[in-house]
Amino acid sequence: MLLRKFYLLLTAGLLTGFAYSQKKQDGSAMYKNAALPVETRVKDLLKRMTVEEKAGQLNQLTGGAFTGPALNDAGQQAKMQMVRDGKVGSMLNVIGATETKAIQTIAIEDSRLGIPLLFGYDVIHGYKTIFPIPLAEACSWNLNNIEKNTGVAAREAASAGIHWTFAPMCDVGNDIRWGRVMEGAGEDPWYAGLVSAARVKGFQGNLDEQHVLACVKHFAAYGAVEAGREYNYTDVSRVALWNKYLPPYEAAVKAGAASVMNGFNTFEGVPVSGSHYLVTDVLKKKWGFTGFLVSDWASFGEMITWGYAADAADAAAKALQAGSMMDMEARVMIAHLPELLKQGKVTVHQLDEAVGRILEAKFKLGLFDNPYKYCDVNREKATLFTAANRQQALQAAQEAVVLLKNNNKVLPISNKSARIAVVGHYADSKEDLFDFWIAQGEFKSAVTLLEGVRKVWGAEQVSFAAGYRADATTDDKLIAEAIANAAKSDVVLVNIGLSGKMAGEDRSLANPVVPEAQVQLLKALKATGKPVIAVVSAGRPLVLTAVEELADAIVYGWILGTESGNALANILSGVANPTGKTVMSFPYAVGQIPVYYNHFNTGRPVQTDGQGNWYSRYRDIPREPLYPFGFGLSYTSFQYSNLQLSSALTDKGKVVTATVTVSNTGDREGEEVVQWYIRDYAAAVIRPVKELKGFEKVSLKPGESKQISWKVDDKVLSFYDASGNLVLESGKFTVYAGGNSRDVLEASLEVR
Ligand code: BGC
């Protein structure tokens, strides 16, 4: 938290007395005239700018050393002088209406052209009111609410002077060693695209002062980092790029995202900040993206360390030549563009295109006409952490929970006089509730599991024992306390998993498992004979094989945000019926990683009877994950029947209607995520064994059945070739319907 102290306000105050000698531009300049079209204003301003000022627009500095090494931190006073000199176009990590206003005032009043700064910040899952991590939120399969949640985050951030968030992360990831899977929407490219688009719409709305610009990151294929290690190399084929990695970025761009961030990774041996293919050919030309790009933290400069650029000047040239634009914290653009232009290594056209797009975003936000529209202290006070925002966060957290196991219907605990033993250090630790990306969220106002459970059952019925320590170790005494509490209770709720601090950037793990001490604790609790309910907290799926054997029920609680404990208590008590379905497969063992539902058949697929030799499998563990993609239980049960296609033979250009009956066979109302998958059996490039192509979240009363229908059209059946063209080939397909990617009904379809 200490790192988040910002010194700029103080510095800005100190510097206001400094003499300012540069001549201000004429107030009647065309770019200052709000009545003129944005294009005209941008052109006029570009004509007035020096090369240094243009380079300044491509320079983004941090207000604090928050999200990366502050290698170039020349001190805040020097930064403010750069703002005065027109050498800064944007800042990140400057927080709050007061502080952003102070710095914006310097840019407007003291710089020659008065170009407003753009303030960016990582608003990943809430600003002050913290929502579930994006991975968990995606498990809700509720796109409307995802958009609403993001809208709340946008309103809060925008009230605090922020114009621009570095979200959504659109990286498809299937390696749970990578700490950043928490920021994405899981392993399915199509679904991640829908979630990303919903988040873009929620953030941006109609681009008024209640919203912020979105930033699609980390372009592209950063989710493929080798061995799940942060900042690592990536190597994907063009077929994989188009079919597996690009769809979410494309969906977010098509939803109107104003900006895109380059990744830290590589494509075809080139750091992606310098990839002309990705930035210019794909993003700008093929997708027609007209917004602006920003590097990831120092990623332009890191092209040198990768061994792609010889020095900072070469890095700046290569980034601009590729079509990349704003330089976050590497300062290679500001340092070298003027000389590169003189040497003819970059062109005015390249520079003006980049600068023009950034200026255009500032004009569109209305910052030239009212630079302080986001800096209203009263609005900030009235907007942050309101009861309504918390209510929305509670709803989001409930929808994010995934019930993985519920033997003998041990859940919900509907008995209000039950005595409950809450066990587990995390259950009582606000410190461990959150990950790295919590913007201005406060630990102290977040609700723990213990608090939530006490609220529902009453403090006198609830005991607590830590069971293990913060560092995930335990001893006989801690375990004995937990057993003693369990013995005098009716049910044990044990909170295991990882601290929130282990999720996010630079949180790669070689062993994403439930720590051994917690397994030991679970064994001891199981031996008491009491029902044991494991509530697992983590920013990623963990290997739960040991837990599956020991717990009667498993509630996957991810990192749920401010309302965490209330949401979990509502689920545990049955006030809320779980509806979440996991968007990442849960591996059976670490050695299986990456394991994902949309894998390829291989030439030697697993034999279902487990007999025989020479097929693709492990000798020591199953080939399949512990819990498949799309899996999640409810307190009621659903049955699928009667999958039908309107025609088993179709032609390109025609639409086939698939229908399936879904019945609530349990005794309470519930919501089910009905999932539609396809398989293409023979194509110019091999296709996965299943691909999610449709879903619907339906509510069913006990005993009720509904017929769900879904349209199978050309788009559903197509795939991308290596050049990014959608291709539909005739041949045999299967259509699947089910409540997860494993347990499905199927029907054959042939396309002529
Ligand atoms: C992360 C980005 C983030 C940026 C700014 C980087 O280290 O990779 O996702 O938006 O920092 O904080």
Image (cartoon, rainbow, N blue to C red):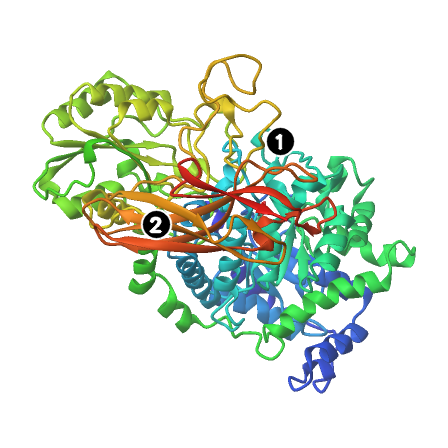
Position of residue 245 in the picture relative to residue 707 (left or right):
right
Position of residue 273 in the picture relative to residue 415 (left or right):
right
353 shown above or below 701: below
Question: 403 or 201: nearer the eye?
Answer: 403
For mark 1, give the secondary structure. Answer: helix
Q: Which mark is residue 82?
A: none
What x and y, as percent, mark residue 613? 54, 12
Q: Which residue is mark 2?
A: 661
Question: 210 or 657: nearer the eye?
Answer: 657
Q: For marks 2 and 1, give the one nearer the viewer.
A: 2
What x and y, as percent, mark residue 642? 37, 46
What x and y, as percent, mark residue 728? 66, 49
Q: Mark 1 or mark 2, which is nearer the start of the sequence?
A: 1
The residue located at (74%, 36%) in the rendering is: 305
Position of residue 629 in the picture relative to residue 101 (left or right):
left
Amino acid marked by disc 1: Glu
Q: Which residue is mark 1?
A: 226
Where is residue 609, by image quadrant? top left
What x and y, as percent, mark residue 746? 45, 40
